[in-house]
Image: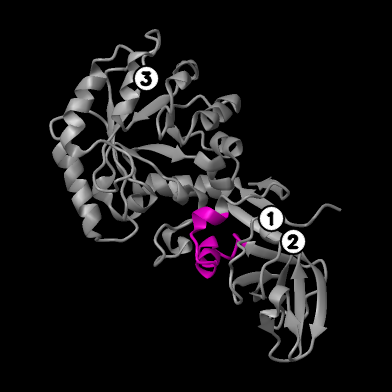
Amino acid sequence: MSRPASVVINLAALESNFQRVRQLAPRQKIMAVVKADAYGHGIGRIARRLAQADAFGVACLEEARQLRDAGIRQPIVLLEGPFSADELPAIQQLDLEIVIHHPQQFPMLAAAGRDHALRTWLKIDTGMHRLGFPPAEVAAAREQLLGYAAVSRDIRLMTHLASANEPGDALTTRQLQTFADCTAGMVAERSIANSAAILDWPDSHGDWVRPGLLLYGVSPNVQRPSLDEGLQPVMTFASQLISVKRLHKGDTVGYGATWTCPEDMPVGIIAAGYGDGYPRHARSGTPILVNGQRAAMIGVASMDMLAVDLRNAPTAQVGDPVVLWGDGLPVEEIADCAGTIPYELLCGDRKRTRFHEQG
């Protein structure tokens, strides 16, 4: 038998989440963000199931090539643009779209082959101060792009929001106004809204929305759980109990003896640890489902194993199933207990963990 730690990818849940995005932004085109191996879900399987997406967003040429190799024919957008002029022949050959966010990318376009016009997105820095042209330089940058033979005439405009997960946030309001002001009068399709803005900032929806976290069934707003937003978890990280024993009051559990039994009690050991992508810094009390019952992780996560307090599941036995996050246990809860964000857990390194598809 293989090691029981596994990841189940629910493709029916993915489709349901996509339709939820469609409900929230019914008139917009949808660019499904599948960078970082589709947030750890498997870029090929996710993109193939999202046949209704109008485009896909990736971070680099390697990810785009994976999509084309998987048979994806929809537009693919390189969200960080080309990193060097050497990439442009492949970008043109793969028929990719590029984001231009810095003047140093202009010489790349000047040297690009002219037999394939590149569809281009001009990124504007409206206040996140990561990538993008300052508002005062947008008009000139757009004119310069229009002067390159390798660039198609229909340049699109985009920006990224820093704090859209906070409803009513003043920075988001300023960013939206800045974007409107510096693009006024420009005839172009516009894209602003990430997952959080799709939910809470309808004025940001523009012509294109760019869902990432929403597609995978996770709420970007920590105050509103994913189920309240009509989302379903796509990834379930699961395993089994491989040991159950009864410990005595005062016994300690795990490396460093950081957790002490407050009474005589059953303790289980789960075949999963940080070597499988479970967060090393999850604190004692982090929830785990054992046979569908809430239990608590205790002690310190080790590379291959976790200890769990079975007082809420006293009949648990070796071989019983556990859910570390996913179906019935939102990944947001685990991230909070580990002092991190859901993105990091979903994108975790799970090279030795078996993946299964359902739905």
Q: Which residues are magenta?
A: 325-345
The verdict on residue 336 being magenta is yes
Judging by the rendered image, the residue that carries numbered circle 2 is 304
Q: What whole-number distance in Å separates the C-alpha atoms at marks 2 and 3? A: 47 Å
Horizontally, is 229 left or right of 1 in the view? left
Query: Separation of disc 1 and disc 2 at Cα?
Result: 7 Å
**Element type where label 2 sits in the image:** loop
* Residue type beneath disc 3: Met
For label 3, the residue is 108
Q: Secondary structure at mark 1?
A: helix
Residue that protrudes farthest toward the right in the picture: 1
Q: Is residue 66 above or below residue 201?
A: above
> Along the horizontal axis of the image, is 355 left or right of 145?
right
The answer to which quarter of the image holds residue 207 is: top left
SS assignment at label 3:
helix
Q: Is residue 176 above or below residue 280?
A: above
* Left or right, 144 with reference to 185: right
Residue 180, label in figure: none
Task: Please give left or right for residue 83 compared with residue 135 in the image.
Answer: right
Q: Earlier in the sequence, mark 2 or mark 3?
A: 3
At label 1, counting other C-alpha atoms closer than 10 Å, the crowd grade (few under 14, some 14-19, many 20 or more) is many
Which one is in front, 113 or 1? 113
Between disc 2 and disc 3, the foreground one is: 3
In three-dimensional space, the C-alpha distance between marks 1 and 3, rounded to whole angstroms, equals: 41 Å
Query: Which residue sits at x=60%, y=41%?
Result: 42
Residue type, mark 2 in image: Asp
Nearest-to-viewer mark from 1 and 3 = 3
- Which residue is at a point 72% across and 79% down the rendered structure image? 310
Residue 232 in percent (x, y) is at 52, 56
Task: Say how the picture is coloured.
Answer: one colour
Amino acid type shown at disc 1: Asp
